[in-house]
Amino acid sequence: MRITFLGTGTSHGVPMIGCACAVCRSDDPRDTRTRPSILIELPALSESRSGESNGFRLLVDTTPDLRAQALRHGVDRVDAVFYTHPHADHIFGFDDLRRFNHLTRQPLSAYGDERTLAAIRRTFSYAYDPDAPKGGGVPDIRLCPVAGPFGMGGHEIEPIPVMHGGTPVNGLRIGRFAYLTDCNVIPPASMARLEGLDVLVLDALRHKPHPTHFRVDESVAIAAALAPRRPFFTHMAHDLPHAETCAALPPGVSLAYDGLVIECR
Ligand SMILES: [Zn+2]
Ligand SMILES: [Zn+2]
Ligand SMILES: [Zn+2]
């Protein structure tokens, strides 16, 4: 499978509006971070009628930067969406899903826990209220609640429950890849489901403590405990200059950055 990091920044993005710090003014492109999202391309299990191999594309979260992210990476098709949780930095690009509806002439399925999908239904009520005016079209998104592993495009997706402050949210595992954005506690039962990973992507907001996100040193400790072959950090604030932070991390651990593409078994 192939993973594209569409965005690796915290909720404000980097640079932040009205900030003149060194990271916000950096000309290293890896210090420009849009809101956090990844695109997972899963290999097709069978060939299409034309003989082309057409993988299954799962978008994880729809950030306020979704339109720019899709344009930058030439994403012209999404087959399903997985929502980790309903914070604004993870759902506010929901309306941009309309383009994928138009391009495929199909509804799109969005998976997430009950609480997340209820928040989406409430926040984007115009898409679900039969009486809402439909001028300009509304996203056609079928909300599919999940409470455990589920199948998609012939692959098994395993939601991984983690804590984000006092709120339970989901990471996900597919094969030997796991993505845990927005968390500060991984319960023991979930730790047990994260063994044998090739790639682990983990929240690492900054060095200072935060009530709902892992600090860099906490994420380093988790990466050491789980020992994935390649650990990457995401959801970074402007406190973390890319080059300098990576140089200080243990060997093999790195910050992800917008546009990074990795292959994973
Ligand atoms: Zn700044
Ligand atoms: Zn969050
Ligand atoms: Zn977030």
Image (cartoon, rainbow, N blue to C red):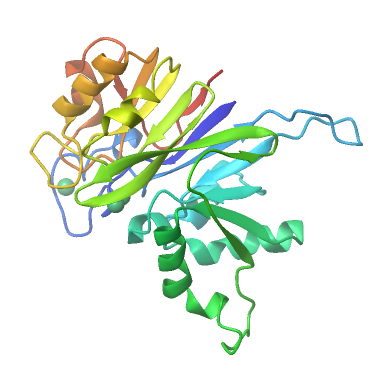
Q: Residue furthest left?
A: 208
Q: Can residue 176 be seen in this view?
A: yes
Give 67 or 188, whichever is nearer the viewer. Answer: 188
| 153 with respect to 18 (left or right) | right
Q: Is residue 64 visible?
A: no
Depicted 86 relative to depicted 223: above or below: below
Q: Position of residue 79 (x, y in %)?
A: 66, 48
Q: Position of residue 238 (x, y in %)?
A: 19, 43
Q: Where is residue 195 in the image (x, y as percent from the top left)?
A: 39, 18
Give 137 or 122, whichever is nearer the viewer. Answer: 122
| 5 with respect to 217 (left or right) | right
Depicted 86 relative to depicted 54: above or below: below
Q: Which residue is drawn at 48% across and 71% down?
A: 121
Quadrant of the frame with the C terminus: top right
> Residue 170, located in which quarter of the rendered image?
top left
> Residue 1, located in which quarter of the rendered image?
top right
Give 12 or 197, whichever is nearer the viewer. Answer: 197
Q: Which residue is drawn at 21% across and 39% down?
A: 184
| 47 with respect to 20 (left or right) | right
